[in-house]
Amino acid sequence: MTQPPTAALGAELCFTALPDVDPIDVMQAVLREHPGARLERSAGPGGPFAVLLPEPAAVAVAVTTPVAVDQGSESARDLTQTWGWSGGREAAAMALAHTTHTVVLAERSVRTQHPADRVRAFCDVFAAVVATTGPVATWWPASEQALEPAVALARRLGGLVNVRMFNDAERAGYVVMDTLGMASLGLLDVQCRFRDLELDRVAGLLYSVAAHLVDGGHIADGHAVDGVEPGRKWRAYTVGSMVGPDRPVLALRP
């Protein structure tokens, strides 16, 4: 099966009041990590802008002006697979329900073919906007999860990749876990069906394998990776996904 096509990375920052998104403040924060970054204005003071990051990233990240929230769209967000919010999905839903404005970050152009460079560039701009505006929540459309800003900042892949969990409808007692969001980077998501294993450890393994692929690692069909049990190897195979969306995934078999 072929690798999925790439798509633009994106995130939404959610606020309980109209935020002051100052491009100069954002750029000062970005320049600490990317001294050669440039600011591109598209609509004058107060308008949307883009941050152009130099090689090796060669990525432009667009930042919109704040948009008033349509409360209907907030309630339409599916939080079923939001596992990273510290107070649980109900706390995430409450935080989003009280937001009044959003700011969207999205890749506008990408010249690099290296997923790790794209992730770093996007997450660095995301961190700069978070630091200068103070959102109360973040929403990641491609990975279908809400995260507290501090949690997203602490993660290697930000909120770009989510580890989901489902009960297996075909085999009682089995759980299906997969990642969602890797397709935006042109990479395979990772999947596993198992029983009688610690959920957190399997989730951690899937996330680690995803990060390995982002960093340029290659896992061929039939290749063995370290499992969650000491001394046990799990084989990896490219198969069709067990849970939608339909896509090729890298399945780990305990």
Image (spheres, rainbow, N blue to C red):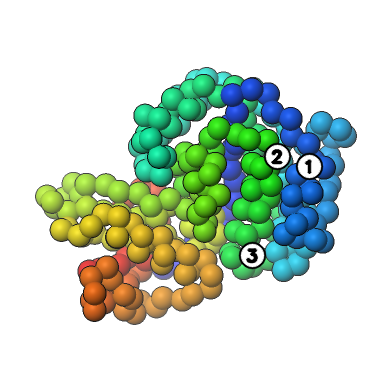
Q: Are marks 2 and 1 in contact (CB under 8 Å)?
A: yes
Disc 2 target residue: 132
Q: Position of residue 96 (x, y in %)?
A: 49, 27
Q: Position of residue 41 (x, y in %)?
A: 84, 42
Q: Are marks 1 and 3 in contact (CB under 8 Å)?
A: no
The residue lying at 75 percent from left, 57 percent from top is: 32
Circle nearer the N terminus (2, 1): 1
| Front residue of 138 and 213 | 138
Q: Residues within 10 Å of mark 1 (few under 14, many from 20)?
A: some
**Residue 124, placed above or below residue 48:** below
| Front residue of 70 and 30 | 30
The type of residue carrying mark 3 is Asp
At numbered mark 2, what does the secondary structure look like: helix, strand or loop?
A: helix
Disc 1 target residue: 25
| Front residue of 116 and 130 | 130
Report the side of 225 relative to 171 (left or right). right
Disc 3 target residue: 117
Report the side of 120 relative to 91 (left or right). right
The CA distance from mark 2 to mark 1 is 7 Å
The residue lying at 37 percent from left, 29 percent from top is: 90
Circle nearer the N terminus (2, 3): 3
User: Which quarter of the picture shows residue 89?
Assistant: top left
Q: Are marks 2 and 3 in contact (CB under 8 Å)?
A: no
Image quadrant containing the C terminus: bottom left
The furthest residue to the left:
172
Q: Position of residue 216 (x, y in %)?
A: 53, 73
